[in-house]
Each structure stands twice: as C-alpha cells, then as structure tokens.
Amino acid sequence: MTETRRKQFLVTGATGFQGGAVARLLADRGHAVRGLARRPGAGPAPTSAAVDCVPCDLGDADEVRRAFEGVTHASVVMPLVYDSETVLRYARNIAGAAREAGVERLVYNVNTPLPKETTPYAAFETRRAAESVLRESGVPTVVLRPPVYLDNLFSPWNGPALVNDGVLAYPLPAGQRVAWMSHDDLAAATAAALEGEGLAGRVIGVGGAEVVTGPELAEAFSSALGREVSYRQLDVGHFEAGLARLLGAESAAGVAGIYRYAADGGDPDLLAPDPSGVEHTLGIRPTPITDWVKAQPWEHWAAENTG
C-alpha cells in the first residue's frame, strides 16, 4: 500500500502580483503554502498571512534545493529577468530541486504565449528555453501560457487616464485580438492545473472569458464605468520608458519585446486563445471583462486621489 504524502505547495514569486494571487488562493483553500521571494515582505502584492514566505535566490542551487524540501506541488513563474544564461540557471535549479524532492506536479506559468517561430525577443526566447528545461526535467509538468492581464490596466500608468480622461492607452494595435485575463483567474487556472487529473505534459493556452480588440475593450469599460472610454494605441517606446522607471531598463526592455512583436504584426492571434478551452480543460469559468471592471475600486485613481 502506497503512503499518501501530505500536500505541500511551493509558489515562486509569492510577493509578486501573479505568484501572490496563486499563493493566496491556495492558502485560502486550506493548503500548506511555502512562498519564495527574493525579498519577502517587500513585494507589491503581499501574500496571505497563512503563507510561509521565505527568501530564495533562484540562481543559488543549494538555496533552491532547501526551499523544495518536502514540497509535493510547485507553481513556478520566472522573475522579470531576461538574460538567457540567468533564466536557464533558474530553470535548471528549479528542475533539479523539484526532481530531487519528488514533486508530483509542477505548473509553469510562461507569462506569455510563445510564437511558433524563434524571435529576436528575450521575453519569448528565455521563457521558451525555461519551458523546455522544465518539461524535460522528469517532473510531471503542466505549462500555462496566458495572454495579457486585465490587472495591468488597474495601475498607476493606466488607472488615472481611464478614470479622469476616459482614455484606455495600451501598447497593442487597436485591431489586436486579446483574451484579457485577470490575475485571480490565472490563479484559479494554476490551482486547477496543480491538482487536475490527466494534465501532466500538457501545454495549455489560457485566457479570459472574451476575445476583444482595443475598441471593444474600451466599450466594455464604458459599459461598466457608465462613461465613455476610448482606446488609444500607446507607442511601445513610450511604454518602455515609463516601465523602466518602475522596473529598470533591462526588465522594461524585456517586457516591451512582447509588444514590439505585436506592433510589427507578428502572429495576430497569438494573444487570443479560445476562451472555451480554459473551461473545458481546467474546469474554470473566467470572469467577464465588465464584471472584472465593476469589481475594481477605480475611485483610487480619481483626480483628487492622485496628487
């Protein structure tokens, strides 16, 4: 008779927005959760008090090995680092530690869809390389490839313009079809992938409830906010410069590569996975855009609160 191990979940990037959403959801469901972060408590999205958040340098194989001790299930997302050797080292350390710990299921959030062809953009190619390492690790792995996050729009660089000026500015062509997804829905998809039957080895394109163009997204915001909102394509260089002030030049350049690829006309359907796929494959029903918009405290970005 095989002894069943007590489930111990590990979440990388647990003080980040995406990892934090996963860690909170798992903890809220009563699971034992160990969160990894370079600087616990210093992230933008603090984890639940029920999450045991520990420091870990993914580039240090011994630290990663210790962090994985006793872990049965792992949710992995890479930090906003785009140096190829560094990301490969992270992936190899995670793969080795997970294999040594006997991890039963690892879910890797690529954080972007991947074009079929090789590109000059590190945002795609470093994540493609990490995906390959994890899938070939011998650890039962599920890969999730999400598109663009709705939560990006509830931010200091989008919120004030949306609320005060009725302008939704984003660095994607107006005609680009996107299945915008929330961090909470990504967390639900990750939790389903961590425990679902028959998913090991799968690469799943996940997304939100609807696939919309920029003007259609603005129309959904107009309906939810009760005021006119128009879409404006933001110049990628301008977007990158603003992001650099928050993340640093290297990370901003990495992120901006995704939008440069889209602006150049690369694969118009890359960000538009079939919404029905998430429900059929993972058994979750993503939140409609208007429902997500209505649930956000947009008054935070009103003119009197932005000074």
Image (cartoon, helix red, strand yellow):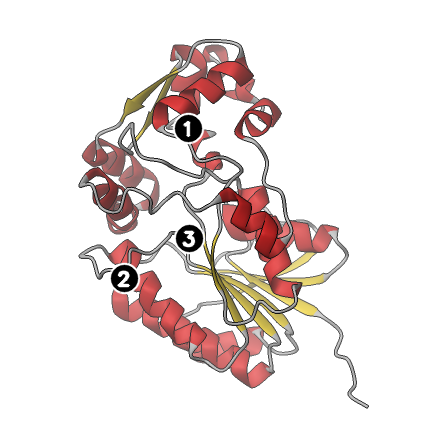
Which SS class for mark 3? loop
How many numbered marks does the figure carry?
3
Q: Amino acid at mark 3?
A: Asn
Whole-number angstrom distance, CA of label 3 to CA of label 1? 21 Å
Circles 2 and 1 in contact, beta carbons < 8 Å? no
Who comes first in sequence, dot 3 or dot 1?
A: 3
Badge 2 local density, few (<14 within 10 Å), some, or many (20+)?
A: some
Q: Mark 1 falls on what kind of element?
A: loop
Q: In x, y percent, where is residue 47?
A: 62, 49
Residue 272 location in percent, x, y?
A: 40, 43
Which type of secondary structure does the marked residue at label 2 adopt?
A: helix
Q: As rendered, which of 256 and 291 lies closer to the eye?
A: 291
Neighbor class of circle 1 (other Cα within 10 Å; few <14, some 14-19, many 20+) is: few
Q: Is residue 172 left or right of residue 30?
A: left
Q: Which residue is mark 3?
A: 111
Q: Residue type at mark 1?
A: Pro
Query: Circles 3 and 1: CB distance less than 8 Å?
Result: no
Q: Residue 187, percent across and down?
A: 58, 50
Residue type (three-letter) at the residue carrying disc 2: Glu
* Residue 143 vs residue 20, the one in the foreground: 143
Q: Earlier in the sequence, mark 2 or mark 1?
A: 2
The residue that disc 1 covers is: 156
| Observer able to see residue 60 | no
User: Can you name the residue that lies furthest to the bottom here?
Assistant: 1
Q: Around disc 3, counting alpha carbons within 10 Å, would you say few (fewer than 14), some (14 to 19), or many (20 or more)? A: many
Give the numbered dot on residue 125: 2
Q: Is residue 80 above or below residue 97?
A: above
